[in-house]
Amino acid sequence: MRKDLPEVALQATCNGLIYDWSYQFLTPEAVEEYANKRLPKNFDEARKQLLNGTYLNISENREVSHVLARGRHSVLNDGDHSKFAKIARKLRSGQWLGSTGKPIQHVVNIGVGGSDLGPLMASFALKEFATDIQKHHLETHFVSSMDGGQLYAVLPVVDPETTVFIITSKSFGTIDTFANVDTVKIWAQEGLQKHEKTLQDWMEHHVIGISANTQKMTDYGIPPAHQLTFPESIGGRFSMWSAIGLAIATSCGVQVFQRMLEGARMMDEHFATQKPSENIPLLMALLGIYNREERHINNLAVLPYDGRFRHLPSYLQQLDMESNGKQYTADGQALNQPTGPIIWGGFGPNGQHAFFQHLHQGYDSFTADFVVVLHRDTKRFSDNVTNSLKSQQHLSVANCLAHRRLMAVGQSSDNPANHYPGGHPNSLFALKELTPESFGAIIAAYEHKVFTQGVVWGLNSFDQPGVELGKEIAKDTYKAVLDKKLGENSNVLFDASTDALIQWVHD
Ligand code: F6P
């Protein structure tokens, strides 16, 4: 047994959410000391500003207001007058009619990055909490990738007469999203032509726009009644609490969306008030910094043991890596030290049969966040099936506990094949039950972790200039791919590899 395991479990809690950091090989005293050392003097002020919507995103010269989107400025604040809620309810109740008079049965969210990952993750996780699901069949689908790969799967199962497309794009200009919309437009026109419906009819009955840029939505032809907006001050990867979350409300209902916001608000309150060794986001941030800087571990594996959290790793990849994957400070100084880790991961139980071999006995260091749901009580099936499903949940809990312990504690043997080095620091999020509230709380905790780490490292966590150059180069590359203009005929000189591959597109 390792000597550095605590005698009492180290757990911070917030409304049914337990963050267990017993396997981080640090004591609460050491964490409090580390907090004093690493949190800058302005941290309290910065946290206050984040929570009241006045923290400055300096490079884009605007305040950061995603926290307000789940409180003071929530899209649901107007109660029955909330346009967001009205649209979602109309769709869910079957009262939204398509251009030929049929009730809408499918919603397709077209967006990418922050306009996809949060709504996709939450819709998938919280679907079973919908209270009005039986009344009208409405299915929500997600399309994000520029290759059209998802359209190949979605278009055959939806019908232009009974489908609404939500175009979600903060900028309302992302090429990936509009490449998908262009294809859908052609498909819809072809489908509606036989009913003598025009593109205009499609736009008026089958398209909703969500963006921070109202003008662009209007210019695109989206009727004002079907436009939802949110402020520029809400970053894409922090936007699922805002109008961008409409697909969550169409999948799970407005009430579930509201409960998710409530859970996030509980975490905001917790973040504002708890001392570091009992404050979940602060612990996550400080332990992460310690692992990065003192233990030189460059990655964090996100390992959910409940299928409803299946999309959490990719959501956190954007949240963390797009925010803190930087080597310069907010005021533009080069930073010569590690910052945000590489986030990766996958569904834990299946990972056990795929990549866990490397985690248990491979060469590399890693840290991990496990996520587990302790109870799942579904009333949908017979008693026998329900009991069997409960046992499956407990089987998953047991596997999660066993693997995380082995990764931390290890087990020695003289036979190298039976030797498990252990020593991999990890944390566990245990939810007593998955509810919209506990889900909202866990996501808000990750947001605040990313924010805290950004403040400690002196980064601006709210911009992403590093994604721009690739987009620019892709434009010229696209021209070359379309026109086969290479070498002296091209605007840009590539290299032997790229030239040869472009050549292959045409051969
Ligand atoms: O290219 C990165 C990015 O700007 C992300 O930050 C954003 O979430 C995504 O693209 C989609 O942007 P938009 O919502 O403006 O279409």
Image: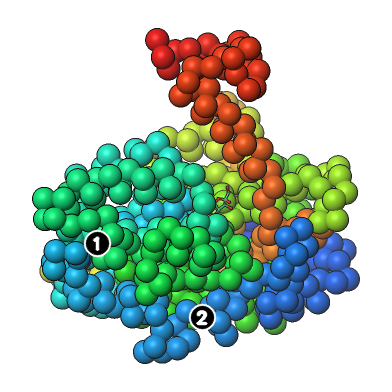
Residue type at mark 2 is Ser
Sequence order check, earlier mark of 2 and 1: 2
Q: Closer to the camera, 216 or 471?
A: 216
Q: Is residue 291 left or right of residue 226?
A: right
Q: What is the x, y in percent for residue 394? A: 35, 60
Residue 362 occupies quadrant: top right
Residue at horizontal 67%, vertical 69%? 64
| Label 1 within 8 A of ligand 1 by Cβ | no
Residue type at mark 1 is Asp
Q: How many marks?
A: 2
Q: Closer to the camera, 353 or 94?
A: 94
Asked whether residue 401 appears in the rendered view, the answer is no
Residue at horizontal 52%, vertical 27%? 479
Quote the CA–CA distance across marks 2 and 1. 31 Å
Residue at horizontal 49%, vertical 44%? 175
Residue 72 occupies quadrant: bottom right
Q: What is the x, y in percent for residue 18? A: 54, 70
Nearer the observer: mark 2 or 1; the answer is 1
Which residue bears the numbered disc 2? 74
Residue at horizontal 36%, vertical 45%? 182
* Mark 1 closeness class: few <14, some 14–19, many ≥20 residues within 10 Å: some
| Quadrant of image for the C terminus | top left
Q: Is residue 104 left or right of residue 285?
A: left
Residue 138 occupies quadrant: bottom left
Which residue bears the numbered disc 1? 201
Give the answer, above or below, for where 385 lies relative to 72: above
Q: Is residue 200 left or right of residue 98?
A: right
Give the answer, above or below, for where 246 lies relative to 299: below
Q: What is the x, y in percent for residue 158? A: 20, 52
Q: Under tag 1, what secondary structure?
A: helix
Q: Under tag 2, what secondary structure?
A: loop
Q: What is the x, y in percent for residue 386? A: 20, 66
